[in-house]
């Protein structure tokens, strides 16, 4: 058995107990568990409620000791270039391993404090040998369900710190934050702000920690008002940039913790009639295709999304074969990609209005 989380696997109620609880025969309860259609709707409802209430564990139809040719990938959304890069990495690695992939989006939500059983039941029914979760925020109950079903799984860039023993793959976010900030410092910037994602998310807090570490190492000022959070939302990032520009001493450079948020920053600067990088230098994070499309092209920290996904798939294959990775956390390196959005701070005349006041722009 592959142990994939922190919860211990315990024996659940038998089918006979479920049948007695629902007031039906064991064969009828078995039909419901196995998805048979020849069961009355009211009977199916009673049995399903009993299954949920008692926490009955539906056993896999495949041999848990032998990997099938199918794995599941659960992504946060299918509407972003981020997901496209992850899909590309998983697909390439799965092809090499002779596996097929079923892709689902946004199926890790809960109902009434319990995990959605429908998706888990489908996972069992189709005989998937393992699961990859990308940007998923699982509950303790969902981790326990996966453990109880004895299905190996790997987290790709988990939102929160996963329980002890859960295998995950991510990027060197702290180092990326250091690299972005050191680049701006090397250009001569002293007033450097950061627009981060969610405060509680692992990647966001690590990038901000790297930013603070780089400032401290350089002996540069760290101003609390220069740290803003935008939840990885482009429109919120636009508002946060406008807030920074309205400070008595606005920054001359900003480290934006995702390329998507950097688009909102560009929009805010355009509204104020400011130029990138002449008035404000901008560094992003991710190196998504959007970073090359905007003008000027965005200097950004590249995290290897496709490589992260491929690494996670290869780890999952090992776990499906009964091999436990020596380390539960794998981090791939990040690197700075310099483009046209960064330059040294402009030397301004003593009588010139401060950046961000909107002078001459009608703001």
Image (tube, rainbow, N blue to C red):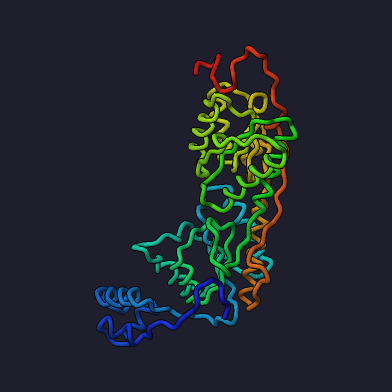
Q: Where is residue 206 shown, x and y percent of the image?
A: 61, 50
Q: Percent x, y for residue 354?
A: 59, 19
Q: Is residue 137 above or below residue 287?
A: below
Residue at 54%, 45% in the rendered image? 197
Q: Is residue 180 visible?
A: no
Q: Quadrant of residue 168?
A: bottom right
Residue 111 x %, y %: 36, 62
349 vs 295: above or below:
above
**Among all residues in the image, which is located at the extreme right?**
186
Vertical placement of 177 versus 325: above or below?
above
- Left or right: 12 with respect to 264? left
Judge by depth and name the residue closer to the eye, 318 or 348. Answer: 348
User: Which residue shows up at 54% across the image and 32% down it?
Assistant: 241
The location of residue 363, given as percent across then percent down, is: 49, 19
Q: Nearer the viewer, residue 237 or 217?
A: 217
Identify which residue is drawn at 74% across, 32% down: 187
| Displayed quadrant of residue 314 | bottom right
Does residue 191 lie above or below 8 as drawn? above
Q: Quadrant of residue 35?
A: bottom left
Image quarter hosting the N terminus:
bottom right
User: How many circles with numbers are drawn on the protein?
Assistant: 0
């Amino acid at each position: 058995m592959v142990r994939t989380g922190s919860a211990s696997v315990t024996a659940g109620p038998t089918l006979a107990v479920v049948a007695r609880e629902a007031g039906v025969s064991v064969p009828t309860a078995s039909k419901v568990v196995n998805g048979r259609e020849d069961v009355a709707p009211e009977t199916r409802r009673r049995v399903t409620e009993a299954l949920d209430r008692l926490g009955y564990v539906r056993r896999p139809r495949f041999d848990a000791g032998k990997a099938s040719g199918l794995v599941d990938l659960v992504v946060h959304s299918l509407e972003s270039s981020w997901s496209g890069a992850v899909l590309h990495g998983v697909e390439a690695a799965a092809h090499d391993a002779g596996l097929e992939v079923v892709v689902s989006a946004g199926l890790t939500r809960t109902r009434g404090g319990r995990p959605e059983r429908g998706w888990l039941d489908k996972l069992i029914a189709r005989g998937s040998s393992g699961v990859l979760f990308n940007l998923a925020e699982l509950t303790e109950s969902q981790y326990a369900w996966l453990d109880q079903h004895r299905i190996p799984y790997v987290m790709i860039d988990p939102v929160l710190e996963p329980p002890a023993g859960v295998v995950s793959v991510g990027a060197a976010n702290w180092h990326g934050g250091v690299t972005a900030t050191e680049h701006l410092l090397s250009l001569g910037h002293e007033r450097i702000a950061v627009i981060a994602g969610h405060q509680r998310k692992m990647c966001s807090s690590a990038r901000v920690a790297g930013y603070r570490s780089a400032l401290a190492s350089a002996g540069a000022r760290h101003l609390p008002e220069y740290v803003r959070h935008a939840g990885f939302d482009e429109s919120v990032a636009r508002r946060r940039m406008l807030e920074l520009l309205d400070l008595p001493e606005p920054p001359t450079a900003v480290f934006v913790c995702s390329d998507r948020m950097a688009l909102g920053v560009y929009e805010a600067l355009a509204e104020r009639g400011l130029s990138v990088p002449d008035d404000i230098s901008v560094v992003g994070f991710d190196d998504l295709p959007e970073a090359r499309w905007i003008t000027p092209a965005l200097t950004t920290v590249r995290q290897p999304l496709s490589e992260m996904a491929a690494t996670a798939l290869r780890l999952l294959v090992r776990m499906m074969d009964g091999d436990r990775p020596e380390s539960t956390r794998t981090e791939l390196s990040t690197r700075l990609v310099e483009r046209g959005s960064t330059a040294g701070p402009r030397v301004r005349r003593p009588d010139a209005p401060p950046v961000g006041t909107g002078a001459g722009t009608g703001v």
